[in-house]
Image (cartoon, rainbow, N blue to C red):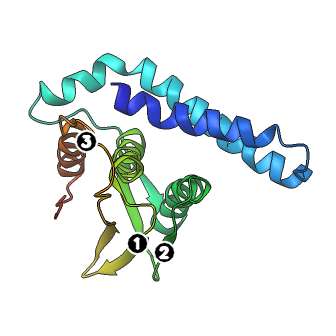
Amino acid sequence: ISHDVRTPLTALMGYLEIISDEALSPEERKAYLQICKNNAQRLKSLTDELFGFFLVFGKPTPDQQAEDFDAATLLDQVIVEHVMDLTQRGFRVETDMGEISGTLRVDLGHFRRIFDNLFSNVRKYADPDLPVSISLRNEWEELLVTISNHINQNQSRVESNRIGLQTCHKLVAAMGGEFSQHR
């Protein structure tokens, strides 16, 4: 749970710190405030559904509230927010957004949770001296999202129970997709 709550909370705290910079333009401040509002809303949603998420591992299939979204718009919103966060943390991010088209039928809360978990792992384990690559492609009427990085060999050992990746796998499968990871 701390993994899921810390991601939006850490982003919220970081952006609030940025907002305190008096040199920001009104437009920048407004954009950062919107990101703060979005993360606060995600925290509220997480706490509202806390016990529901515990049930992800207690049920064969997590409950879904699937909706249709424009794929390009949804992915742009989700990915750009995480790219901005990584950049603020000193990571170099290379993106190849490709020509994304079509509709995604997803449970928005689960969809955001998947990306929150993945980017939380990037922040924890990636080598900030090497690029993080994000690629989005339409292939054979499917959407392929690839996030790759180099593991930071110089960090002290970070314990992991791999629950974040297990959650991603289960949620992606529940929405009819496939999830794979490679070391």
Q: Are marks 2 and 3 in contact (CB under 8 Å)?
A: no
Q: Which of 100 and 124 is in front in this view?
A: 124
Of all residues shown, which one is farthest toward the left? 60
To which residue does mark 3 refer? Answer: 157
Mark 1 falls on what kind of element? strand
Of labels 3 and 1, the one closer to you:
3
The image position of residue 44, as x and y in percent, is 52, 23
Specify the quadrant of the image occupied by residue 177. Answer: bottom left
Q: Which of 13 and 80 is in front in this view?
A: 13
Q: In this view, does 182 lie to the left or right of 21?
A: left
Going 74% across and 43% down the picture, which residue do you hit? 18
Q: Circle 2 sits in a helix, a strand or a loop, which is it?
A: strand
Picture coordinates of residue 3, whole percent (x, y): 35, 32
Q: Distance between the residues labelled 3 and 1?
A: 23 Å
Crowd around label 2: few <14 · some 14–19 · many ≥20 (10 Å): some
Q: How crowded is mark 1: few (under 14 residues within 10 Å), some or many (20 or more)?
A: some
| Cβ atoms under marks 2 and 1 closer than 8 Å | yes
- Amino acid found under the numbered disc labelled 2: Thr
Report helix, strand or loop for mark 3. Answer: loop
Q: State the residue position of label 2.
A: 95
Name the image quarter holding the C terminus. Answer: bottom left
Which residue bears the numbered disc 1? 133
Residue at the image point whose x is 18% and y is 48% from the top: 169
Q: How far apart are marks 2 and 1 (CA)?
A: 6 Å
Dot 2 or dot 1, earlier in sequence = 2
Q: In the image, which is nearer the foreground, mark 2 or mark 3?
A: 3
Q: What residue type is labelled 3?
A: Arg
